[in-house]
Image: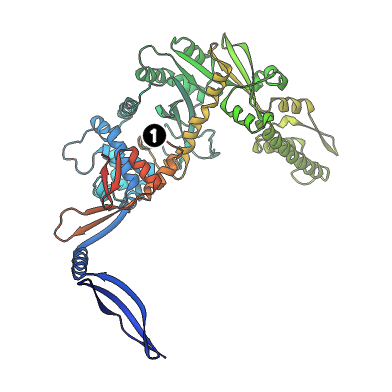
Amino acid sequence: MYNLCMPHMYKKVSKGRTYWYLRETHRVGKKVRLKWQKYLGTAQTILAKLEEAEELGKAAQVKTGSFGALFIAHLLEQLLDTIGIIDRVVPRVPNEKGPTVGEYFFYAWANRMIAPKSKRALEDWYRQTAIQHVRPVDLKELSSERYWEKWERVSEEQLKHIDEAFFRRLWSHRDQSPENLLFDTTNYFTYMATKTNSQLALRGKNKSSKHHLRQVGVGLLVDRASSLPLYYTVYPGNLHDSKLFHKTIDELIGVVRGLCQGDKEFTVVFDKGMNSEENLALIDSQRQIHFITTYSCYFAEHLATLDPKHFAALETLKNHKLIHKGKHQDLLKAYRTTMTLWGRPRTVVITFNPVTKRKKLYDFTRKMDRLRAELIEYRRKYRQKQRHWRSPKTIISRYRKLCEDLYTSHKYYRLSFTHDAMSFRKDNSEIAATKAMMGKNIIVTDHDQWSTEQIVTASLDRSRIEQQFRVSKASCHVRVNPMFHWTDSKIRCHLLTCVIALACLRLLELTVGGRHSAKTIMEQMHNLDCVLSWRKGAKLPQVQIEQPNEIQAQVLAAFGYEIKDGWVLQIKS
């Protein structure tokens, strides 16, 4: 039989001192058993805890918000002074209230760094953060309407001045000026209506396969060693890469000379899409500039179809790793020669990657099987004289459309027709030539003093700028697409915020170091929250930041901060 008792205070005296416990007992039969017990302390300890609880109860308001990522964006802004740069170019007008144009850009690019939102959703997003502790602002001012008003004041000429000043500031903190540069282009689709007037948003071959939408092109120049941008340009979506390169090469060279020290030579690495007689002649005329580009295998089949036995394995880090793993069959190989191109003798390196060849051969076989299956079906329908399948011209047109959809050549099969039958056969010479070129890549340069390994490694490093473009299109950070902007001026301002965010993310990676990507760093810092508590009568809130994890502490330490002494953010001593 159990008899329950209510919780009660219990006193113990030990060595003349009184200690208090909160306990609950129950009776089991004729005996009293302890159910649970919690130590409270001495009378003085209990009084102190009651007073502390009373003080905490006086808090009029308590709020939590994401702190870490915004704080890092704030520190980067202080380093790069984007607000000051923009406000010096676009100062306040008389009677202007609220944030400056530079501050509007900051709130936009900080959001792009952390968790990209549309301008319409920006106000609500900032309400969930500790923005009032990091950089106070009236959140009602961050409406899409206010952004349009502010950005309408920024001209194309002013944006150029802002770009130049930003990159100068960015590179003023680097110990080494750029030597080897990577240039490439990409495009971003918009949902702008066909009838909307725009000189930028035009239809062209979209790299995201959104060919039916209008697009805007962006050319980006980055440093090969650090992957930090030095220059970017916005151009109409229907402009070919080679024409863009010709239009911007003078400006590009001027930017690099402004950042480089003295008469230092530098090398520009670009893709075969930029190649033209005029572009290479312009580079040849500049004493300080060298180039590395790629060349289409179809324009030099005698080199692209060389037997791999003529190729030698390269002394590269990746090849050494493959040798260590025993994968000698996967080594990257190269063949070096000279060839007259664009009016001058050039150093030409043909590379052969067995891994790439196997992948391409697998994909090629799959497409050939698909073509054969479809052609068998075409032949059956033609033989049965089905409706819409009676004309050889129509069937050939459909076959070529199928090849376009599969991104393959229509020359691999030859179609022939009689009155009652259709036949097709493989063109073995075309197939053999295509297979011989698989895994091959042609590199052209004017660096005749460089080793083959140096040339190949520099060309392969174009993947670094491609990685920057992938970051710009990722949904988690930057996210240039989709652009819901209807005027060229707004598109240019939007792209400026994205380029600043892209540069800051890469600068963050370099500052923190280690193996963590900007994506990981920002996600971790976004999860570092702070608690703001307003007590009655107090003008400012009390701020406490939660205990950081290993990555968060590492990021704060890289910027000279730490959290200690009761969750307080402090400068490291």
Tell me if residue 152 can be seen.
no
Residue 501 percent location from the top left of the image: 38, 37
Query: Does 146 appear above or below 285?
Result: below
Residue 331 percent location from the top left of the image: 65, 27
Binning the other alpha carbons within 10 Å of mark 1 as few (below 14), some (14 to 19) or many (20 upward) gives many
Query: Does 403 appear above or below 71?
Result: above
Tell me if residue 542 can be seen.
yes
Query: Residue at 69% of width from left, 33% of height from top?
Result: 358
141 to the left or right of 366: left
Q: Residue furthest left?
A: 537
Task: Report which quarter residue 114 is drawn in.
Answer: top left
Nearer-the-camera pick, 122 or 525: 525
| Dot 1 amino acid type | Val
Query: Does 280 appear above or below 494?
Result: above
Residue at the disc numbered 1: 499
Per the image, label 1 sits on a secondary structure element best described as helix
Residue 464 percent location from the top left of the image: 49, 30
